Image: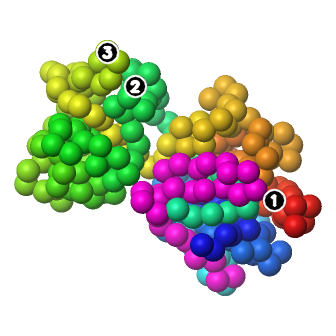
Amino acid sequence: MERFDIAIIGTGPAGLEAAINGKIRNKNIILFGNSDFSNKLIKAPKINNYLGFNDISGIELKEKFQQHIEAMDIKINNERINAVYAMGDYFALMVNEKTYEAKTVILAIGMEAAKPLKGEEEFLGRGVGYCATCDAPLYKGKVVTIIGYNKEAEEEANFVSELASKVYYIKMDKGDSSLNENIKVINDKPVEISGESEVKSVVMKNGTIETDGVFILKDSIAPNHLVPGLELEDGHIKVNRAMETNIEGLYAAGDCIGKPYQYIKAAGEGQVASLKAVEYLSKTK
């Protein structure tokens, strides 16, 4: 298996800047994220504090970013990382049933606005999961509930429906669905995940669903769920001025490490994280 020098998770300004600097320093990088970069960026009507780009819209700045990475032949891998494990001298990055390996990792995963559901963290690993295709075989012939926030969640729901006896899909995004006919769509708001030693039900605003398992499929995963053992502080990834986390070889940058949530601040942190990853690689040859 190919082992990359630097794996970067996230395609906001922090992740893109980290990728650019890694590429400039001739490192073998892999960049995971969304080809639209960042919803926060493309929805910005005007940006006036990004040096060199006065009075520019988010879409226009996104196009500038696109031109830059294309000129440097940087590709975006649209696969979603579900877990990152520190393996000693490298990291294993899990994408459903596939694994990538990297000597260093930079987290530029942004900030998830939504708070966890009541019971979500309590039942994590006991009926609650974040990767339906990873754990679907555990629920063969059982009842599964999927709380889906995007189109990728629908794809995972369709996969699970081929194994589970029944699948409920709680639709959290807008737009048309492309779900298998045997999936029951629930247009209601989840309030709590409940059970005893394991998950037993999802309490909705207007009722309750009895279920054996719950998959919560968002655009991003809470950092400490994504990387076991990662230290947080005030809901953000704890780093020092070198963007180093408490795990050797793992760095973080951008909104995920704290306020202010600003594009130019995130880009600078992405650069520092990449420089420090390169420095770390030179010391561990």
- Name the residue at 38% across, 29% down: 126
Q: Earlier in the sequence, mark 3 or mark 1?
A: 3
Query: Which numbered circle lies on residue 196?
Result: 3
- Give how far across and how far down residue 171 sits, in percent: 24, 43
- Colouring chosen for the image of the structure: rainbow
Vertically, is 263 above or below 245? Answer: below
State the residue position of label 2: 123
Quarter of the figure that contains the C terminus: bottom right
- Residue 257 located left or right of residue 192: right
Q: Observer-nearest residue: 87 or 264?
A: 87
Circle 1 SS class: helix
State the residue position of label 1: 277
- Name the residue at 74% across, 35% down: 238
Q: Amino acid at mark 2?
A: Phe
Q: Residues within 10 Å of mark 3 (few under 14, many from 20)?
A: few
Quarter of the figure that contains the N terminus: bottom right
Q: Is residue 83 magenta?
A: yes
- Give how far across and how far down residue 191 sits, in percent: 30, 23
Circle 3 SS class: loop
- Mark 3–mark 1 CB contact (< 8 Å): no
- Give how far across and how far down residue 169 sits, in percent: 20, 42
Q: CA distance from mark 1 to mark 2?
A: 35 Å
Q: Residues within 10 Å of mark 1 (few under 14, many from 20)?
A: many
- Mark 3–mark 2 CB contact (< 8 Å): no
Question: Magenta region: which residues?
Answer: 72-98
Circle 2 SS class: loop
- Mark 1–mark 2 CB contact (< 8 Å): no
